[in-house]
């Protein structure tokens, strides 16, 4: 491990070897020799690995080698295994997930996380993250290491907009300090290949013509596989020195440093690249060990067996001998061996007796031994292939091969076993994706313009000025509404003062009571207005409610996060690291049946949980916050996403607002009150009917009295006329008639007095019945109220008991808890 943190002091001369001075860039800050020595040292550390990688590249996919028809026959086991492992460790691009680190529902971190998540998602799409991850995946599967490198490109330098570029680094284009683990790495270097024109545009402003001394050449190895053209390019290294917080550019052949500057990216871990995705590492170093080396011996055996099988297959031909003259036995057998035909070959034998003197006309060469040998070789090759699957951990389920006789449990066990063997590689690619999200987010928050962030995130957050304007407008509206309400209250008070009753007290009802069919007074309440409530007071209450809603809206505007607050959080790297949590979703292919099963399980959990939480919230809306947290805890393992979390938060806020509102009466109390009102309406109807009947009787008695009086007066007039006609002799008789009439009148008056007494008695009876009914209704009202209070108390006790049970920890079934 090389230390480039500080130059040696004179007191340390005895502790430093002369060789170490060649690896300290601080001795000659403007020279590139020390940095080139460090690069060469790192290349030597990875030299053997790169040789293995060159062999692997040729074995995996080299069209020139595979197209050679005269090469030995091979079994492409390595390519097949790689094609299975690749999609198993990475199958879909990562989706950035940025959430607040602490779940305290603070508005600014929530808004900042949503804005940053949207920006990183757009940046990944523009950087073609899937193509990059596929290249990294292939390197991890083939050679054991995949590298990505991030950089910022401002607007105007070949781009119409500023963007984050994520580059894939070839294994020979990435170096770092020789270290035992990644935390000990002090510098990283990434190579770029530039033509002379490109190098002049890049380095002439900083180092003049020094770029001309670089070694420009055409890489023949890369050109052979079609990776470059015929133009000469030089290799320029961009080195990030973590110890000295500097970035330098050097090239082989150039004595001076081409450029040096402060880090143009403020990354949390300093380096512009995440830790590479590793497979297997050599113990005590960061040198990868390709997986193919673990079963290379088996691959060689398989290829050797394959070559033998093909050779024996070519020799498996029908060749025979028949008698002829003039040829020796040896020459015949030699001819049979040397001649290669696609069909059958017959060789004549002149001395047939020397050949054995067989009575058969044709003697065939034996083929059963060759066929048995081929069968044995094929079986041996199958055994070695199985050994490779055991080494690699590739189950037959992962390879798409299965046995119909196996049970579902056996197949699931194989899948789980295979997934366990490749889980480390899957997690490495997920970790690399998460680190890319972190670095991309840091570049966006540090470098991007506010307008670009707004366009990328499509955020609707107001700025601080917009918030102040909205608050000012709402304050003015509230001031006007408050003033209007005060004026209305003053006018109502004046009207009430003018409508006070005269000193003599209120006037009573007119004599004789209300007319038939009239309803009792409704206390001046208009239709639709509750009885006993003044319309003006109702209007004032509505105005006060509007003002209260305005105050709530003003508070909501002032408490809402602004874009300026989000940008302030982005600008503070320390607080940003403490506040936001960077994640990604899974990058492996999701099994459709497993996904359906998880979704069904998710719905089942909600179906059991929601009714219980709903009952608790309905009983006491103040428990909405607790219920929301329980619901989030239950749904967290299913990664339902930000939309469901937002819906749960909205539900909690709505329940809290409902809890702040006055609660209505208990349903049992409402039902009892409704029944009581119905009884009151029935009683009022009976009273109205009794009053109408009494009034009709009184009017009937009056009419009968008037008719009787008219009849008596008529008789008196008739009798008086008779008496006037008969003369004085009838005076005595008339006098007698008058006396009889007076007696009749007195009798009629006595009858009238009796009738009036009956009417008064009837009224008294009706009044007493009304009082008795009123007492009965009061008693029913009290009983109903006592019953409603008792039911409400029982409901509160049940809710308290249910909340207490839910707050208790779950005990394991079948035994007592600790």
Image (cartoon, grey):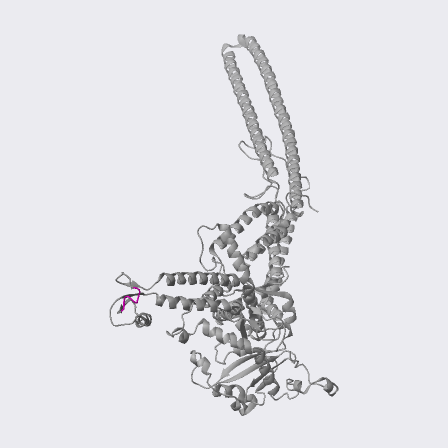
Please determine whether, in this image, residue 643 is positioned above or below residue 63.
above
Q: Is residue 413 in view from this perspective?
A: yes
Residue 155 in percent (x, y) is at: 51, 78
Viewer-nearest residue: 442 or 528 = 442
Q: Main secondary structure of the magenta part?
A: loop
Viewer-nearest residue: 556 or 225 = 225
Viewer-nearest residue: 214 or 580 = 214
Magenta region, residue range: 351-356
Please determine whether, in this image, residue 100 is positioned above or below residue 163.
above
Viewer-nearest residue: 406 or 709 = 406
Residue 70 in percent (x, y) is at: 37, 74
Horizontal side, residue 64 vs residue 463: left or right: left
Q: Is residue 122 in view from this perspective?
A: no
Assess whether residue 370 is covered by the magenta stretch.
no
Residue 516 in percent (x, y) is at: 54, 31
The answer to which image quadrant residue 615 occupies is top right
Please determine whether, in this image, residue 291 is positioned above or below residue 815.
below
């Amino acid at each position: 491990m090389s230390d480039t943190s500080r130059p040696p002091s004179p007191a340390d001369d005895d502790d430093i070897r002369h060789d170490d001075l060649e690896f300290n860039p601080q001795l000659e800050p403007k020279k590139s020799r020390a940095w080139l020595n460090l690069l060469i040292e790192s290349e030597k550390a990875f030299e053997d690995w790169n040789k293995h990688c060159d062999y692997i590249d040729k074995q995996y996919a080299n069209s020139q080698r595979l197209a050679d028809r005269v090469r030995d026959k091979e079994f492409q086991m390595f390519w097949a295994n790689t094609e299975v492992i690749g999609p198993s460790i990475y199958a879909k691009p990562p989706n950035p997930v940025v959430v607040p680190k602490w779940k305290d529902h603070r508005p600014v971190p929530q808004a900042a996380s949503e804005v940053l998540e949207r920006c990183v998602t757009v940046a990944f799409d523009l950087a073609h993250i899937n193509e990059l991850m596929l290249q990294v995946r292939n390197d991890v599967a083939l050679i054991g290491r995949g590298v990505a490198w991030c950089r910022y490109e401002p607007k105007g330098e070949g781009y119409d907009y500023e963007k984050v570029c994520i580059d894939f680094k070839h294994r020979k284009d990435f170096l770092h300090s020789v270290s035992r683990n990644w935390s000990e790495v002090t510098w990283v270097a990434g190579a770029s290949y530039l033509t002379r024109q490109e190098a002049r545009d890049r380095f002439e402003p900083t180092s003049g013509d020094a770029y001309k001394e670089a070694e420009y050449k055409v890489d023949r190895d890369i050109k052979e596989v079609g990776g470059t053209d015929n133009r000469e390019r030089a290799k320029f290294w961009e080195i990030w020195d973590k110890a000295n917080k500097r970035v330098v550019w050097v090239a082989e052949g150039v004595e001076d440093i081409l450029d040096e500057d402060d880090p143009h990216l403020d990354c949390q871990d300093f380096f512009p690249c995440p830790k590479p995705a590793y497979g297997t590492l050599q113990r005590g170093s960061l040198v990868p060990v390709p997986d193919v080396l673990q079963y290379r011996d088996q691959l060689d055996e398989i290829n050797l067996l394959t070559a033998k099988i093909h050779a024996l297959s070519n020799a498996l031909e029908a060749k025979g001998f028949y008698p002829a003259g003039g040829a020796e036995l040896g020459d015949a057998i030699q001819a049979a061996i040397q001649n290669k035909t696609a069909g059958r070959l017959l060789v004549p034998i002149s001395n047939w007796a020397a050949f054995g003197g067989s009575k058969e006309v044709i003697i065939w060469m034996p083929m059963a031994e060759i066929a048995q040998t081929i069968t044995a070789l094929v079986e041996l090759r199958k055994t070695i292939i199985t050994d490779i699957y055991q080494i690699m951990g590739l189950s037959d389920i992962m390879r798409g091969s299965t046995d119909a006789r196996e049970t579902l449990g056996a197949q699931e066990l194989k899948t789980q076993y295979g997934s366990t063997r490749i889980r480390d590689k899957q997690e490495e690619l997920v970790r690399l994706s998460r680190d890319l999200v972190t670095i991309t987010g840091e570049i966006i928050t540090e470098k991007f313009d506010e307008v670009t962030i707004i366009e990328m995130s499509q955020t609707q957050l107001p700025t601080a000025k917009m918030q102040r304007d909205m608050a000012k407008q709402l304050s003015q509206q509230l001031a006007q509404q408050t003033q209007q309400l005060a004026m209305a209250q003053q006018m109502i008070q004046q009207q009430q003062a003018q409508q006070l009753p005269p000193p003599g007290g209120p006037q009573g009802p007119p004599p004789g009571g209300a007319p038939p069919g009239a309803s009792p007074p409704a206390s001046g309440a208009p239709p639709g207005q509750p009885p006993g409530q003044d319309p003006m007071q109702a209007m004032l209450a509505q105005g006060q409610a509007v003002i209260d809603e305005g105050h709530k809206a003003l508070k909501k505007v002032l408490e809402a996060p602004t874009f300026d607050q989000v940008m302030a959080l982005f600008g503070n790297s320390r607080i940003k690291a403490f506040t936001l949590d960077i994640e990604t979703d899974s990058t492996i292919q999701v099994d459709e049946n497993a996904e359906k099963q998880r979704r069904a399980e998710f719905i089942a959990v909600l179906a059991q949980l929601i009714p219980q939480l709903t009952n608790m919230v309905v009983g006491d809306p103040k428990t909405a916050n607790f219920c929301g947290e329980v619901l989030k805890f239950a749904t967290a393992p299913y990664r339902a996403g930000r939309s469901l979390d937002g819906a749960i938060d909205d539900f909690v806020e709505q329940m809290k607002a409902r809890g702040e509102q006055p609660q209505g009466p208990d349903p049992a109390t409402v039902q009892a009150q409704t029944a009581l009102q119905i009884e009151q309406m029935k009683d009022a109807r009976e009273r109205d009917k009794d009053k109408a009947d009494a009034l009709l009787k009184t009017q009937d008695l009056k009419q009968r009295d008037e008719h009787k009086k008219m009849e008596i007066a008529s008789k008196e007039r008739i009798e008086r006329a008779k008496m006037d006609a008969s003369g004085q002799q009838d005076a005595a008789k008339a006098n007698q008639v008058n006396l009889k009439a007076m007696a009749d009148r007195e009798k009629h008056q006595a009858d009238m007095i009796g009738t009036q007494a009956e009417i008064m008695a009837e009224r008294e009876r009706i009044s007493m019945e009304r009082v008795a009914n009123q007492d009965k209704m009061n008693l029913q009202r009290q009983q109903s109220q006592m019953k409603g209070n008792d039911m409400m108390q029982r409901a509160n006790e049940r809710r308290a008991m249910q909340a207490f049970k839910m707050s208790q920890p779950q005990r394991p079934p079948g035994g007592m808890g600790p």
